[in-house]
Amino acid sequence: MRKCRVRELGRIDYAQAFELQQQLTAERKQGLISDHLLLLEHPHVITMGRNGRAENLLASREILDRAGISFHPTDRGGDITYHGPGQLVGYPILDLREWKRDVGAYVRALEQVIIDLLADYGIAAGRIPQLTGVWVGERKIAAIGVHISRWVTSHGFALNVDPDLSYFQYIVPCGLTKPVTSMAQLGVRATLEDAGERLAAHFGRVFDCEMMVEAAEALSRAAGRPSAPGPPAS
């Protein structure tokens, strides 16, 4: 069975995580390392995918700066999204030549991992035809945006465990006008550590690999750090 190394990185700046992904994807392409799953959370950040539209950013850079939100263009697919404390972010670095050479199947598999995780907590989540991500009714609970180069993946997904949803006011999430939700808003209290452990288990089952966990820093410890103040009124 293939092995996948799970690295729990705690709270890490987006630029630092992006640099790590670039390093790992280069090494994976050369066959120097096995598959990886990075689990982490970010400080407040808005990212714009390569298909993003400027009009989906609803605030000026000055307003973002005042709210303590950084902004990063990036090379993943999709439009605009927000990351912040209370989100479980996952960046799989997988060589799809050892699983399935099928981008659509890969994205559906990521969705399935999150759907199965949420079912553990009694949340009935699913898909909406023609839309990427995981939904509870008409509300989005997890966003997915990936990059694939020579069949090696980077970027990934963000699951709303217990983020401050008011930060989504600065964007049109993923270019859609549908609302967002979180596990906490749905009445489920979960730590990032527990959600991450469950997610890694489902990931191993869906992708048929053995998960090798390396706890560099417990996600729950990162989640317990004081977060930035809430956004000012816009």
Image (tube, rainbow, N blue to C red):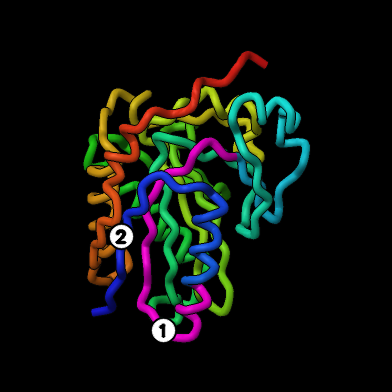
Q: Is residue 223 left or right of residue 43?
A: left
In percent of width and height, residue 113 lies at: 34, 54
| Residue positioned 24% across, 66% down in the render | 211
In percent of width and height, residue 160 lies at: 41, 36
Residue type indicated by callout 1: Leu
| Residue positioned 43% across, 85% down in the render | 31
On residue 32, the disc is 1
| Residue positioned 34% across, 31% down in the render | 183
10 Å neighbourhood of mark 2: few (<14), some, or many (≥20)? many
In percent of width and height, residue 111 lies at: 41, 52
In contact (CB < 8 Å): disc 1 and disc 2? no
| SS under mark 2 | helix
Q: Can residue 129 be seen from the camera position used here?
A: yes
Camera-near label (1 vs 2) is 1
Residue type indicated by callout 2: Phe
- The residue under label 2 is 203
Report, in whole angstroms, how far the alpha carbon at label 1 lies from the one at label 2: 22 Å
| Residue positioned 50% across, 21% down in the render | 229
Region rendered in magenta: 25-45
The answer to whether residue 98 is magenta is no
In percent of width and height, residue 224 lies at: 31, 32
Q: Can residue 127 be seen from the camera position used here?
A: no
